[in-house]
Image (spheres, grey):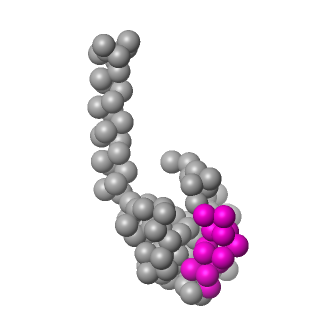
Amino acid sequence: MPINYTLYPDNWFTEIRPAILIRANWRCEKCQVPSGAIGYRDHNKVFIECDKFMLEWCEKTNQKTFKIVLTIAHLDHDITNNNPENLKAWCQKCHLNYDQEKHIFQRKINRELRRKEERNPNGK
């Protein structure tokens, strides 16, 4: 789901987000993976951080790798609540896991709205 940064305060990128990343020492506050690390997923879809030898193996076996990007999670899902206690620096995997129930609920609502529109295309 795309993020609409126009809803965030003007100082999000200059003050709020950097402060949370510094507090977290540029690591995911859940799994401790460092920002910018290179990783891959094994057959069980578990993230594994690559060391030098693993990176060479990934290249030889054409294993897809990815760069860890830290995101800032709003624990209460309210993007207007930028209290530092409500914000966590998490890798994308941890952030998505945290938001999973919210995403499932939102998909259900969207599905129901689409069905309603299909039954009543003119809004009647």
Look at the picture and state if 30 lies above or below 75.
below
Residue 16 visible, this orientation = yes
On the image, the x and y values in percent for residue 123 come to 35, 16
The answer to which of 29 and 12 lies nearer the viewer is: 12
Asked where in the image residue 106 lies, by quadrant, the reply is top left
The answer to which of 8 and 121 lies nearer the viewer is: 8
The answer to which of 4 and 30 lies nearer the viewer is: 4
Q: In which quarter of the image is the C terminus?
A: top left
The answer to which of 79 and 61 lies nearer the viewer is: 79
Look at the picture and state if 76 lies above or below 54.
above
| Residue for point 52% across, 75% down | 89
Most common SS among magenta residues: helix
| Residue for point 46% across, 68% down | 81
On the image, the x and y values in percent for residue 57 come to 63, 70
Asked where in the image residue 102 lies, by quadrant, the reply is bottom left
Region of the chain picked out in magenta, as a range: 9-22
On the image, the x and y values in percent for residue 98 come to 38, 65
How many numbered discs sit on the rendered protein? Answer: 0
Look at the picture and state if 110 lies above or below 73.
above
Q: Is residue 16 magenta?
A: yes
